[in-house]
Amino acid sequence: MILKLLWALVGSLLATTVMGVFLVPYLRKIKAGQSIRTDGPTWHMSKQGTPTMGGLMFITGITFAVLTGGIEEMAAGDWRHVIILVFSLIFGFIGFLDDYEKLKKKQNLGLTALQKLALQVAAAIVLCQILHVMGHLSPTVYVPFVNVSFTMPYWLYLIFAVFVTVGTVNAVNITDGIDGLAAGVSLPVALCYAALAAVWGYTSVGVFGAAMAGGLAGFLIFNFFPAKIFMGDTGSLFLGGAVAATAFALDMPLVLIPLGIIYIIETMSDIIQVGYFKLTHGKRIFKMAPIHHHLEMCGWGERRIFAVFTAISAAFALLTFFGVQGRFGI
């Protein structure tokens, strides 16, 4: 199994890097540049025109590694890695439509919020149903750290699953606000998934986790500050779908609470800011939301935010690994 996971990681990293060498200049050539929000930090305007849709790089790398590294599992009837991949690709396609609309309109407005929500909910329902029918998903919810489980009626579990999936996807999207942040924060998440799957003997899921880690590492070569390319909604929605789908493939959706701590902090800072602004008719808690922009306005550089947030994510990934030892019998 270790060799398969190693191949998935290295193969994805190499494929992503090679893709980047060709994709970055091509996107520049066709002027597929990012439109920067006018209500964001003013210093981000210097990034105007940086190529977007860079998520295609790690999407290509992950797809290549998953399909080549998980052949034996497919032959044996274990298609979980393919289900996760297809689900992630569906979300990536939703993001691609959003990015395309932004590029076509030459502004930071793509699909409407309602259109994106409807597509995401439909995709989440399909994923959960497929995993359930194939016997990989049960309405029994495992609680990390306390090592207890409880069962919900399936209809209620389905609502819960859709909420968790859509929430995770959009939380990852919110986190993608400065150079390298979403990729850096998600790298320890992917490694944790690979390690947990390896311990539990879920080789197919481990292959996907390792491929995701390799793809993100390769992407960071181009996306780390100062970014030569942005992942766009194409990448962030794919990534959010991958993070959520892998948790459900392991039948442990609540693992996203500790493992996705940065996503949660980012999202809650946004919700708190908007809620407080409305309640107080114009007052703010943060200088700007989400919280990475607040820290920027407090004088933090993008490299520092990347390092601190990635370190926190890595610490919680390690904590999560040992927090589910009762589940996996480590």
Image (cartoon, rainbow, N blue to C red):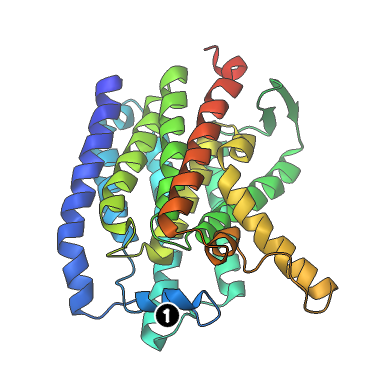
- Residue drawn at the location 71% of the way across and 66% of the way down: 273
**Where is residue 204, by image quadrant?**
top left
- In this picture, is 171 found above or below 256? below
The residue at which mark 1 appears reads as 102
**Where is residue 258, by image quadrant?**
top right
On the picture, is 86 further left or further right than 229?
A: right
Query: What percent of the width, then of the height, locates residue 202?
Result: 43, 24
- Residue drawn at the location 56% of the way across and 80% of the way down: 39
Counting every numbered tag in the picture gives: 1
Query: What percent of the width, then of the height, locates residue 269?
Result: 67, 58
List the single residue furthest toward the bottom. 105
Give the quadrant of the N terminus: top left
List the single residue furthest toward the right. 279
Q: Nearer the viewer, residue 129 or 27?
A: 27
Q: Secondary structure at mark 1?
A: helix
Dot 1 crowding, Cα within 10 Å, few <14, some 14–19, many 20+? some
Q: Nearer the viewer, residue 260 or 272?
A: 272
On the picture, is 134 further left or further right than 52?
A: right
- In this picture, is 44 found above or below 15? below
Q: Nearer the viewer, residue 22 or 139?
A: 22
Would you say residue 87 is visible in this rendering? no
What amino acid type is highlighted by mark number 1?
A: Lys
